[in-house]
Amino acid sequence: MTSVRWMMKGREFVHCNCAYGCPCQFNALPTKGHCSAVGAFEIEEGFHGDTRLDGLRCGMIAAWPGAIHEGRGQVVPIIDIRATAEQRGALLRIMSGEDTEPGATFFQVFATTFETMHDPVFAEINFDVNVSARTASLNVPGWLVARGEPILNPVTGASHQARINLPDGFEYDVCEVGRGWADTSGPLTLSLADSHAHFATLHLTGSGVVH
């Protein structure tokens, strides 16, 4: 049982170093044998106990030396500078997998794979994502700059649309697949180019994805 009830509805953008589609989404090993990723989400409606989370944004920079499930990962959590002390605490509990059933959300699953949790960053998060258009822009000054775009047909140049549906997934129900670019600073310095990105609508609780 979870100790504090929570829920969030919103939109996310996640970008990693794998080939388009990302083998991890299919329980396969990462394209290059290791995983590096950035991500952000905006909460349109949410709460943690009596603390409202509406309108807040969060992000992360993460890396693993092998496949995610093999552990030994590192993460830099990023929390909206606008969040109050109560909201910061609530968001960090959710992102750390607290108040969540084991295996229920990607926050909780990923938390079990991190060997190093760097100090959280409280910063301005400039974020815009259009899930259906497969576009996103993300800028955390001094920490992270990223963007997402549609995959293009190599012959015609037209936008290519592909989706992943995970009926029993721990992150989303359906995501739109695209590509992304990112550069980061700080304890995890990454440079990702023209590799997998996905865009999704989120509806999560301490018990998992609401399908």
Image (spheres, rainbow, N blue to C red):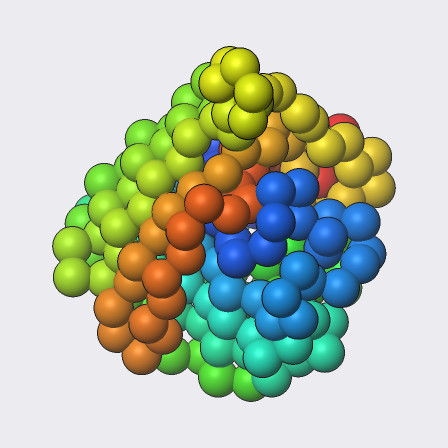
Residue at image point 71% right, 40% down: 209
Residue 120 x/y as whole percent: 33, 70
Q: Quadrant of the C terminus?
A: top right
Where 51 falls versus 64 (above or below)? Answer: above
Residue 130 relative to residue 85: left or right: right
Q: In the picture, residue 200 is in which quadrant?
A: top right
Q: Quadrant of the N terminus?
A: bottom right
Total number of numbered discs in the rendering:
0
* The furthest residue to the front: 155
Residue 120 relative to residue 70: left or right: left
Residue 70 x/y as whole percent: 72, 78
Residue 207 relative to residue 146: left or right: right
Asked whether residue 199 is in view, the answer is yes
Residue at image point 55% right, 45% down: 196
Residue 94 x/y as whole percent: 52, 57
Q: Nearer the viewer, residue 29 or 140?
A: 29
Where 189 falls versus 135 (above or below)? Answer: below
Q: In the picture, residue 42 is in which quadrant?
A: top left
Residue 18 x/y as whole percent: 59, 55
Residue at image point 62% right, 66% down: 32
Q: Nearer the viewer, residue 143 or 101?
A: 143
Q: Nearer the viewer, residue 182 or 120?
A: 182
Residue at image point 73% right, 52% down: 23
Where 41 falls versus 152 (above or below)? Answer: below
Asked whether residue 201 is in view, the answer is no
